[in-house]
DNA sequence: CCTCCATCGTTGACGACCTCCACGATACCG
DNA sequence: CGGTATCGTGGAGGTCGTCAACGATGGAGG
């Protein structure tokens, strides 16, 4: 038990994960400059554009695994660029629904291609099947995240009441 | 054409990668506090301990994908804690070999267990076979990193000019 | 109705991390 | 010998992660 070389480090999953993440994120960021976006902002834009009625900043922070305070800044920037806007919720005056503007949707589409293109570089070594496999594994990893990943998510445990439920009326 | 919804975002490899990386790194960091280390420092310690004669800071930056200036700080901290020391190279007076001290090796062993333990939480959902598979995929991804991942690595390309010449093994 | 408490968004602070640029010392090539 | 490249280092500037606190609101209970 003495020697017990944990691993050559290059076999450590944490190391590989953070390294791979860095490479892909860097490549994606580099590609997105052309749209004046960073991955974080792009992610918010995508989520806002995909939610017909807009998405709560709380949910944004939840899905992205970010502190709510960071979401504020991201939305601020996107709003300043005219890509999203904050709308008041008709049911809860505390929350603000973040929705993509028409121009936001345009940018989102263009950026999606650019981003996929940029990330394509580092991912060149993996074919479709392997990417799907990787998605599967990572998805499982995140699903069973025993530890809270979002700092600001105190107590926010369990099932979201009815996040994606259709706005009944 | 079709609407071409890039993806639900939760299916984007870049997103999953960065999310997973964050979760694992956070858990590992939390576990390592007990040794007064962060993942970065731990990585340097491992590499230094595994190299019998010590390792160049240049190589450190290369392997870790960091800017050389960051390596300086990491080594400074580890040296201040008495876990590693900088030795002059006998062949090149410019380089300094980073080697682990006896105490550094002890800490490294203990920390290895602690770290693996901490990372075990998020990884709970994956069995040995799946982890190996994940390692395989991530390793391949990093091996074919078309873009330079280490910022400070200007021109330092070299090593693997042949893109996946013969990935046999 | 009124009070206590949870939640949402927001702000501010602080430290960790990333990226780039420049420098002195040294090695190496011709 | 001169010119160029590399190693370690320092510093500036920006992004990101984490935490604590606050006003505004919602909701439960008396």
Image (cartoon, coloured by chain):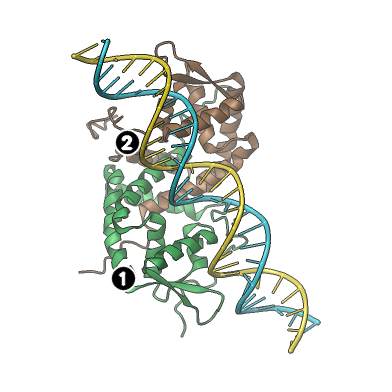
Chain colours: A green, B brown, C yellow, D cyan
Query: Which residue bears the numbered disc 2?
Result: B143
* Secondary structure of the residue carrying numbered label 1: helix
Marker disc for residue B85 = none
In this rendering, the label closer to the viewer, 1 or 2: 1
Q: Is residue C16 left or right of residue B61?
A: right
Q: Nearer the viewer, residue A166 or A113?
A: A113
* Image quadrant assignment for residue C25: top left
Q: Residue at x 55, y 79 (%)?
A: A92
Q: Name the foreground residue: A64 vs B149.
A: B149
Residue B72 shows in this picture: yes
Circle 1 sits on which residue? Answer: A103
Number of labels in the image equals 2
Is C24 situated left or right of B120 in this image?
A: left
Pinpoint residue C24: horizontal percent, then vertical percent: 42, 21
Rate crowding at label 2 as few (under 14), some (14 to 19) or many (20 or more) other CA atoms within 10 Å: some
Which residue is pictured at 50% across the width and 24% down the height? B48
**In the displayed structure, would residue A115 be above or below residue C4?**
above
Identify whether A61 is placed above or below B32: below
Give the CA separation, mark 1 to mark 2.
38 Å
Residue B72 vertical placement versus B122 (above, below): above
CB within 8 Å, label 1 to label 2: no
On the image, the x and y values in percent for residue D23 come to: 64, 72
Chain containing mark 1 = A
Q: Chain of mark 2?
A: B
Q: Above or below — where is A45 with respect to A140?
A: below
Quadrant of res B83: top right
Q: Residue at x 46, y 19 (%)?
A: B96
Counting from the top left corner in percent of width and height, residue B44 is at 50, 30
Q: How many residues crowd mark 1 within 10 Å: few (<14), some (14–19), many (20+)?
A: few
């Amino acid at each position: 038990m003495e020697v017990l070389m944990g691993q050559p480090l290059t076999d450590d999953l944490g190391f590989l994960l953070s390294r791979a993440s860095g490479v892909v994120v860097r490549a994606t960021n580099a590609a997105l400059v052309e749209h004046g976006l960073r991955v974080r902002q792009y992610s918010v834009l995508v989520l806002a554009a995909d939610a017909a009625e807009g998405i709560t900043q709380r949910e944004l922070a939840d899905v992205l695994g970010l502190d709510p305070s960071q979401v504020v800044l991201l939305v601020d920037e996107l709003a300043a660029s005219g890509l999203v806007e904050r709308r008041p919720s008709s049911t809860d005056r505390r929350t603000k629904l973040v929705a993509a503007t028409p121009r936001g949707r345009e940018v989102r589409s263009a950026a999606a291609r650019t981003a996929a293109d940029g990330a394509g570089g580092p991912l060149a070594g993996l074919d479709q099947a392997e990417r799907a496999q990787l998605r599967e594994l990572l998805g499982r990893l995140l699903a069973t995240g025993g530890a809270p990943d979002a700092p600001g998510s105190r107590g926010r445990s369990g099932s979201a009441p009815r996040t994606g439920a259709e706005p009944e009326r």
